[in-house]
Image (cartoon, helix red, strand yellow):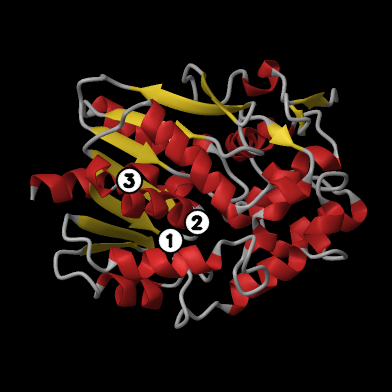
Amino acid sequence: MEIMRTADGVPFVRTQDSAFADLPDYAFAPNYLSFEGLRLHYIDAGPRNGPTALLMHGMPTWSYLNRHIIGSLVDAGWRCVAADHIGFGRSDKVVDEAWYSIARHTRAHRALVEALDLNGATLFCQDWGGPIGLAQAVAMPERFSRLVIMNTWLHHADFIYTPAIRNWNQLWQPGGMLAQAIPDRLKIGEFMSLALGFCPPAALMARVVAGTPMPVDAAQAAVCRGYSAPFEGLDRDGHAGARRFPLSLPFDNPAGGDAEAQAQNFEALKAWAKPIHFIWGDADDVFTETWARAWAALYPQATLDLIAGARHFLQETHGRDVARMFLSRLRG
């Protein structure tokens, strides 16, 4: 793994292009934007004169997560833009954990929106894509025509963090199971096999402790490879960005999680008068249906569609359903 440096001396690594070959349903040409001397990768698919969707990912995923939504929207004549946060996907990966913050990820996406001069865009956001993406809508409301919010949040004083998200934070603390296991004993894609419901927790634990194979079929294994691909050939330092996201949760790290700005954006977004659609996996124990209903209730114009049985990563398991529900709302 070759350590490179930006002109300002920031150390980073770059995943080889071969790691991304032949991924299922992900045949998009790569595009790159320079941000602080680093390559920020993004997809730009579909007709340039079509309506535009900006799709955001969170942790520990990348634009691959949104491929089913992108495919459906492109088929419907949409232009889809989906970037990989620095540290993820085909973007460069800074190896210094202290470099990462939610404020910096937010600035990177603002640079992308401005560089592509996106206007009238629909924002699709989930997980950390919520705080980072919704910050764009607050800062540049003229560039966005509607919001699609999926299984995410904005920090504010009254937000109740679930036991599931607090446990997630603990697993990545020094000495926590995932902090110790990834990447030497467990790949990101193998963890995703649990998060996507491909295997039970006991199988994941057996993989970590005894090195036993994950009980997944060929199709599931191909999907898991897609989530491991960005970190192929990278050691622990190459996973620094992935480690920082769970350790940037505002209840644990207010500065790194940009807690104050998140709370300000939550208040500012209450004035959003354009269309806003909540599409939610109702089986998510991180961002629950109860929270989705409470958030949607703040907007008289909001729509709320629940996907029965969908968990946190609904774009992977129900991406085409998300696109269908959204397009149906537009027709309605």
Residue 282 x/y as whole percent: 40, 67
Callout 1: 10 Å neighbours few (<14), some, many (20+)? many
Relative to 180, 125 lies left or right = left
Callout 3: 10 Å neighbours few (<14), some, many (20+)? many
Give the amino acid type for the residue marked by disc 3 in the picture. Leu
- Identify residue for label 2: 127
Would residue 284 be seen by someone viewing this image from the given angle? no
> In the image, what residue occupies the spot 76% across and 61% down?
172
State the SS at label 3: strand
176 vs 210, nearest the viewer: 176
- Identify residue for label 3: 123
Relative to 161, 184 lies left or right = right
> In the image, what residue occupies the spot 22% across and 66% down?
271
Distance between mark 1 and mark 3 Cα atoms: 14 Å
> In the image, what residue occupies the spot 54% across and 27% down?
41
Residue 78 x/y as whole percent: 25, 29
> In the image, what residue occupies the spot 75% across and 65% down?
171
Residue 144 x/y as whole percent: 25, 44
Distance between mark 3 and mark 2 Cα atoms: 13 Å
Quarter holding residue 236: top right
Distance between mark 2 and mark 1 Cα atoms: 6 Å
